[in-house]
Amino acid sequence: MADVPEDAPHDCPGTQSEDAGKSSACAGCPNQAICASSKPKGPEPDIHLVKAKLDAIRHKILVLSGKGGVGKSTFTAHLAHAFASDQNIEVGIMDIDICGPSIPRVMGVESEQVHHSNSGWSPIFVQDNLCVMSVGFLLPSADDAVIWRGPKKNGLIKQFLRDVDWGTLDYLFIDTPPGTSDEHISVAQYLKCTDVDGAVIITTPQEVALLDVRKEITFCKKVGMPVIGVVENMSGFVCPKCTTETQIFPPTTGGGEQLAKDMDVPFLGKLPLDPRIGKCCDEGKSFLEECPDSPATRAFVDIVSKVKERCGDTSPS
């Protein structure tokens, strides 16, 4: 039997059996405790509820990176701003960075509170066609730490997917923490049944970031999450006065473009640094609206067009 460990007793019922770890044949087996504690569970009972809730959302896109500090939240926020600049497109952001929820600040709604009704939690509206949900709205103070183990984090992600009254959206962008752990596994599991469009992977040019981003792409392939493409953030520095671009983080191993080629995934483009991006995020403003002539804005608009195209949306940007 393929599911019988090599060091198991002769009468082992198999690791996939209902009797795994409990049969008399399991007594004395070195694998007994593992089998008893990791017996496969039935399907997640709330999967169909999540699917029903998200059926009203046309496109679902995750923003991922194995590395922290590469600009996922900034990218997610401005991706949402770019899509919501078309008043005919309804956009939402779900922030599942449980321990570091920065989306409320970046979107300028840090002081808002979530309200609950018979139809579920009501997301916070930044503008008529752009709404946000984050654990940051549920904390008594912006300085409060979220000190949770995996199961509690997973429970909140399920609530965001199942209980938030998103209404009918054209796009839901999901901001994630770095890594390939509890939050990522949970959201991938729930979204798998909802025709998720896929993930945009964020990296910076230097190899220390690319090392972890490769792992994130491998994660996506293992869990069946389509990769919409890779974005190289902080690709160069744009002077806000003369708009000259200078390399700050030289791509010693080819940067995001070479990474995408090596991992056989699309490359969406490069976003240069502009110090005004950080200022706009701190003030909760859209950099795309505040600095429309910046090379970073032009690069962002080009990436947005590619994301739309890969989602099958041919409407003009």
Image (cartoon, helix red, strand yellow):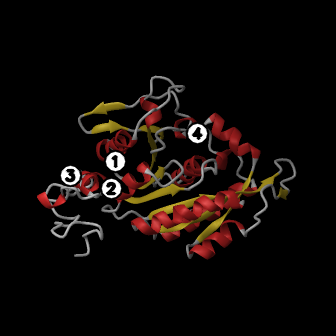
248 and 311: which is toward the camera: 248
Alpha carbon distance from label 4 to label 2: 26 Å
Which is in the foreground here, disc 4 or disc 2?
2
Q: Secondary structure at mark 2?
A: helix
Residue bearing the label numbered 2:
190
Alpha carbon distance from label 3 to label 1: 14 Å
Callout 3 environment at 10 Å: few (<14), some (14 to 19), or many (20+)?
few
**Contact (CB < 8 A) between labels 3 and 1?**
no
Which is in the foreground here, disc 3 or disc 1?
3
Residue bearing the label numbered 1:
161
The disc placed on residue 312 is none
Residue type pointed to by label 2: Tyr
**Contact (CB < 8 A) between labels 2 and 1?**
yes
Please state, as top left, top right, bottom left or bottom right, where the C terminus lies in the image.
bottom right
Q: Is residue 309 left or right of residue 172?
A: right
Q: Is residue 89 visible?
A: yes
Residue bearing the label numbered 4:
106
Residue bearing the label numbered 3:
45
9 and 284: which is toward the camera: 9
Residue type pointed to by label 4: Val
Image vertical order of residue 131 relative to residue 190, above or below: above
Q: Is residue 313 visible?
A: no
